[in-house]
Amino acid sequence: MRDTDVTRGGPASQQGMRRANLALVLGHVAREPRSRAELAAATGLTRAAVSSLAEELLNTGLLTESGPAAPSGKVGRPGTALALDPQGPGGIGAEVGVDHLAACVVDLRGEVRSWHRMEIRNRGRLPAAVLADLAELVRRAAGEAALHPAGLALAVPGLVGAAEGVVERASNLGWEGVPAAAELRSSLRATGAHELSALAIDVDNDANLGGLAELWLGGRAEDFLHVSAEAGIGAAVVVGGRLLRGARGYAGELGHVPVRPDGPPCSCGARGCLEQYAGERAVLRAAGLAGAPGDWVALLAGRAVAGDEKVRAALAGAGQMLAVAVAGAVNLLDPAEVVLGGGYAELAPWLLPAMRAELAARVAVRPWSQEWLTASRFGRRGPLLGAAVGVVRAVLADPGRYAQARD
């Protein structure tokens, strides 16, 4: 964008340079509280420039003065430490699942300030009704957190294409061409949450957001494959610390990779897709629990812990077929590690043994180490965390834009 191009002369270059320096100062403080003098030394900016930038960040509610800075060993009075304002802007995450709705708010440090979840069957419901329920949940979460909302990101179990805020297809919900951002905005307005309805609303695939949570919060390498399951199966491919989205934003549809070309028909129109062997319905059917109501992951985990051999065998079979698809991705992409997220993270004790054996036999590009296949500590919380944290990361990356939007 022209107003951030610092290589050209004139006012736009000066404005862009200041926005970049605001982000530089805020980024250093985000890592640890620092005095103005320490910031000048760390950034290479003059003390006068740092003071001016800090004043702007203080006035915007992004920073606060937190008392004397830690002793530096230098003679003289210690400076005042600047820290992220715990009452500053908050990022709102919202999620539509096949069997639940959820909303949360995180502060600038990424700490969760409120979390609400509703168990509800959304498969086949009208999108407007689903998003009306979600809007009420978002309103409650935002009110409880009592932070200034900086933005809202929505996680959905489906394909989000080039059209902004539109869910092109979510087969497990029965959605097609749903303008989810616009519908949610309208529902927020109907609840009386006018400040929330005015926010920028981003919509993304839940597997993508789960992978981003793993990248930002999980301490992972910069190249990994994140495989997750709710009703369907999705994957996030992270390469060089960035999410690989593909030409049209559809990368990561691992659930529709064929593992047996002559297998049963899939809802996508193909045959033998991974979801027909390792998705929710397939595993429940193999475990003798087809049509069981409630939380399928908790049901399977509880039965497996109790020693139900049929459930354990079903999970081992799912792990084997899951590894067939994952092995192809490993051979193609050579990730540093593979991470099981979503419902798979909670079922990992019974999936991992079969997966590790199958991967060891199928990965051809290099010797396979069992240590490269792990389970996420976020589990089914990952997509919602990724959604909310993504909002505050955008503020940290460009505080000037946040200040303009607030004005």
Image: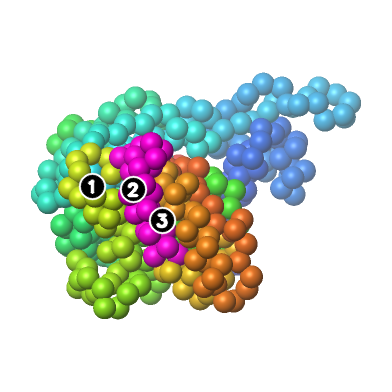
Image point 30% across, 57% down: which residue? 279
Residue drawn at (74%, 49%) of the image: 44
368 vs 305, left or right, is: right
Determine whether the residue tagged by mark 1 lies in a helix, strand or loop: loop
Between 56 and 299, the one nearer to me in the picture: 299
Amino acid type of the residue that numbered disc 1 sits on in the rendered structure? Leu
Quadrant into which the C terminus falls: top left
First-in-chain label (2 vs 3): 2
Give the class, few, some or many, for how many residues have Cα within 10 Å of label 2's Cα (few <14, many ≥20). many
**Could you say which is closer to the camera, residue 120 or residue 160?**
120
**Disc 1: CA contacts within 10 A as few (<14), some (14-19) or many (>=20):** some
The picture places residue 335, in percent across and down from the top left corner, at 56, 66
What amino acid is labelled 3 in the image? Answer: Ala
In percent of the image, x 47 and y 46: which residue is there? 349
Say whether disc 3 or disc 1 marks the residue closer to the N-terminus.
1
Q: What residue is pinned by disc 3?
A: 316
Q: Which amino acid type is marked by label 2?
A: Val
* Residue 162 image-quadrant placement: bottom left
* Residue tagged 1: 289
- For mark 2, what is the residue? 311
First to last magenta residue range: 298-323
Say whether residue 97 is visible. yes
